[in-house]
Amino acid sequence: MPEYIVLLGPPGAGKGTQAERLADQLGLVHVSSGDIFRENLKNETDLGKLAQGYMNRGELVPDDVTIAMIHERLSREDCEAGALLDGFPRTPAQAEALDEIVADLGGKVIAVPYIAVPQEVLVKRLSGRRTCPKCGRVYHIEYNPPRQEGICDDDSAELYQREDDKPETVRKRIQVYMEQTAPLISYYRDRQLLVEVDGTQPIEDITAQLIAVIKEKKSGVVS
Ligand code: ADP
Ligand code: ADP
């Protein structure tokens, strides 16, 4: 049965950073809605053109479009055993849609780690974030720098600052999170799926805790 893990947390909590490490270390398939939108933006697809305005304003892309995109992604063969979701769901309607999608695929959500980070830390994290245009890997100029300044460790591409990581948009995104995404904390707590993790710890320590949580919930992973 396919098993899904949802990483929850505000923008800048470290979802992408952790998802990448968990995918590497546990062999999970990482599905990031933000990465899929950015890929579409880069390739100038219709979906990318539709998403661009919302993303640059720090708003959410409409639910119907986002849900259809994730449904399609999770239906692909590489997600047969499930996936690690990062950035989806982000609204109560998306959470309900995810329940339907996973039921449709014969699976279930087994855990929702919530990476908790106070607001004042988020602004510093997002404004110092740098991203690889080629592979999507994220760095931080201070907290998680690449070996060579401004250059991706993995593919030597020049890192860039996302348009939506500029200060005004960052504030807007945090506000959108508080209004539209934070209600999912109680949605998943009510379903006994939420596991809160302190996101202010060092990156490696958070990964270790997440691995422990996932191993406990997942069938078939031997510790
Ligand atoms: P999200 O996907 O939740 O928006 P990211 O994984 O992109 O968050 O992380 C946001 C920024 O914070 C990045 O620059 C990343 O390098 C940095 N970061 C991630 N986790 C930590 C941590 N535990 N401590 C310090 N900085 C972190
Ligand atoms: P972060 O983790 O830093 O918040 P993401 O890369 O997850 O950023 O998302 C970037 C942008 O892509 C969001 O601000 C939003 O415009 C769009 N987006 C990503 N995921 C979703 C989603 N589930 N629903 C609606 N819009 C989304």
Image (cartoon, helix red, strand yellow):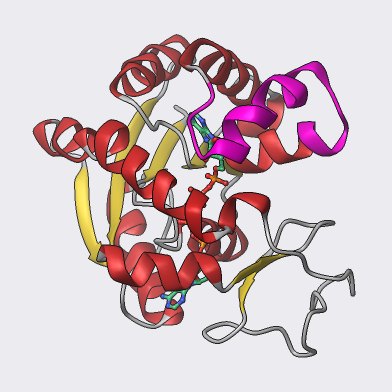
195 with respect to 218 (left or right):
left
Decide whether residue 75 is among the magenta residues. no
Q: Residue at x 50, y 64 (%)?
A: 126
Residue at figure coordinates x 44%, y 60% from the top left: 12
Q: Nearer the viewer, residue 216 or 61?
A: 61
Q: Is residue 80 visible?
A: no
> Which residue is located at x 48 percent, y 33 percent?
59
Asked whether the viewer can see residue 193, the reply is yes
Using the image, determine if residue 28 lies above or below residue 54: below
Of residues 80 and 37, the one nearer the viewer is: 37
Q: Position of residue 186 (x, y in %)?
A: 13, 36
User: For residue 194, what is the image quadrant?
Assistant: top left
Classify residue 134 as left or right of residue 77: right
Does residue 205 appear left or right of residue 178 in this picture? Answer: right
Q: Is residue 156 above or below residue 67?
A: below
Residue ranking furthest to the front: 168
Q: Residue furthest left?
A: 190
What residue do we see at 14% from left, 31% from top? 191
The quarter in which the N terminus is drawn is top left
Does 91 appear above or below 16? above
Stretch of the chain drawn in magenta: 40-61
Q: Main secondary structure of the magenta part?
A: helix
Magenta stretch: residue 47 in it?
A: yes
Q: How many marks?
A: 0
Q: Position of residue 180 (x, y in %)?
A: 30, 31
Coordinates of residue 139 in the picture (x, y in percent): 63, 73
